[in-house]
Image (cartoon, helix red, strand yellow):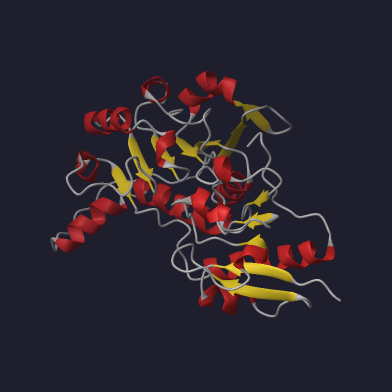
Amino acid sequence: MPTTTVVCLPDENAVEMLGPLPDGVEVVVWDGSGPHPDRLEETTFWVPQVEDADSLDDKFAALPALKVVQLTSAGVEDVLAHVPRGVTLCNARGVHGSSVAELLLTMVLASLRQLPHFLDAQRASRWDLVEGEDLRDKRVLIVGAGDLGDETAKRLRAFDAVPVLVAHSARNGVHATDELPDLLPTADVVVITVPLTPATTGMVDAAFLRQMQDGAMLVNVARGKVVDTDALLAELTSGRLRAGLDVVDPEPLPSDHPLWQAPGLILTPHAAGHVKQAGPRAFALVAKQLRRFVAGDDLVNVVGEAY
């Protein structure tokens, strides 16, 4: 008798986006709360809700036959420590890089071209010309040389900027993080695209920011905890640096937080990957992974212990 592979998806919308199923695959729908659907305990392939971090130990306990967790986001920091031994964790690396890089570039261009000033002037019906800067020949330090770093560098080159990639270890065309003290003072823009790990938590601290040149811009599209919020706020308040933040610490940002009023800051609410195409793109990856799993082939985007 053929073996049935049971796949757990978070909602009916996910079922629709997944599309036609391989032979021998059955879907159960469970968002991680409420009653357990029939055959949930037989699930071997689970797609949680986006960035699901609540009661993960209980959810894994409800899936005793689980073999694969396939995330629809790139970040794994909330999940990694909870994955049971013997279960393979895969992320969505490569799915959201283009949209995140696009917002990142939007922030940089908006700041350089004085767009916040012009929007304020428009709202006040005021014709107020100020001089901006362009991206040509700007040196942009990209701290994090994964898919998002590569996507960002590709777009920067199209604007005749000079991307400089940095990773934990040096390789061809990529600098090591221990070179940052020499690289930071040379950068017009510093972009943070690293995953959140114990090593990157608080990486962008007061000492890091002090090494940036006057008037430089920091852009964080990684995770809020990579940046020391108080240290950055001090630099913004002084007017020495400017910034673009799609992620913050704390998040969501309380309405009375001083970061809202910080000068020289463009702030978006973790919106970089929030585009209409995100779901279909993520579940196109899920569908390919599921076919690999059913066929016994190697999965892609497997997250190792060294993440």
Residue 135, given in percent of the width and then of the height, sits at: 47, 45
Front residue (pair 42, 141): 42
How many labels sit on residues?
A: 0
List the single residue furthest toward the right.
1
Q: In this view, does 232 lie to the left or right of 163?
A: left
The residue drawn where x is 57% and y is 39% is 162
User: Foreground: 228 or 148?
Assistant: 228
Q: Where is residue 59 in the image (x, y as percent from the top left)?
A: 52, 55
Q: Residue at x 60, y 35 (%)?
A: 165
Q: Is residue 62 above or below residue 305?
A: below
Relative image position of residue 155 (x, y in whole percent)? 57, 52
- Residue 121: quadrant of the picture: bottom left
Describe residue 8's horizontal placement relative to residue 238 as left or right. right
Quarter the C terminus occupies: top right
| Residue 36 x %, y % | 52, 68
Between 113 and 264, the one lying in front of the other is 264
Picture quarter with the N terminus: bottom right
The quarter of the picture where residue 225 lies is top left
